[in-house]
Each structure stands twice: as C-alpha cells, then as structure tokens.
Image (cartoon, grey):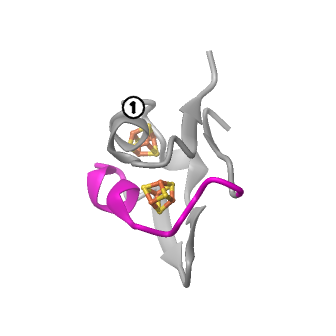
Amino acid sequence: MPIKLDETKCKGSGECVDACPSEVMAKTGDKCVIAKPEECVECGACVDACPNQALSLDE
Ligand code: SF4
Ligand code: SF4
C-alpha cells in the first residue's frame, strides 16, 4: 500500500478526502480510512492537504 495513514495523528478533518483525485480516502466518524488503496496513484495531494501530517507515501 503506497499511501500510509498514522491513525494516532488523524483528526478526521477530511481535507485528504477532498484532495484525492481517485477517491482513495473516505471519512468514518472522527477518522478517515484508506478505503481504496488499490486506486492510489501516489500523487501526494493528500499528504500536502493533511494539516496533521497523518499521511505519508512509501519511498
Ligand atoms: S486530512 Fe489528515 S487529519 Fe484530516 S482526515 Fe485526512 S488524514 Fe485525517
Ligand atoms: S497520494 Fe494521491 S491518489 Fe493516493 S491517496 Fe493521496 S491524494 Fe489519493
């Protein structure tokens, strides 16, 4: 899975859901989840959009 979520840092703000062009991220209550990891194109938009540095891409 190229995109990684640190759930301890995620506040469920949702910027990553809006930023992702492939609808990889989804909100569930007060957290988000990597709903469709196979759709990730590793663009990095969600990493830049997250205000809490909860998302990262594998090298
Ligand atoms: S933008 Fe960051 S803190 Fe907000 S829901 Fe996404 S991963 Fe969580
Ligand atoms: S890296 Fe791009 S495609 Fe992958 S989850 Fe983040 S915004 Fe979506």
Q: Please, what is the three-letter code of the amino acid marked with disc 1? A: Gly
Snapshot quadrant of residue 42: top left
The stretch drawn in magenta includes residue 52: no
Element type where label 1 sits in the image: loop
Residue 19 inside the magenta-drawn segment: yes
Residue 26 against residue 30 in the figure, above or below: above
Query: Which x, y percent locates residue 55?
Result: 54, 42
**Which image quadrant: the N terminus?**
top right
Q: Residue at x 35, y 51 (%)?
A: 22
Q: Is mark 1 within 8 Å of ligand 2?
A: yes
For label 1, the residue is: 44
User: Over which residues does the magenta segment extend?
Assistant: 8-22
**Picture residue at 53% right of the left edge, 65% below the top:** 11
Query: Ligand 2: which quarter?
Result: top left
Front residue of 4 and 30: 30
Q: How many marks?
A: 1
Residue drawn at 41 percent across, 67 percent down = 13
Q: Residues within 10 Å of mark 1 (few under 14, many from 20)?
A: some
Q: Main secondary structure of the magenta part?
A: loop
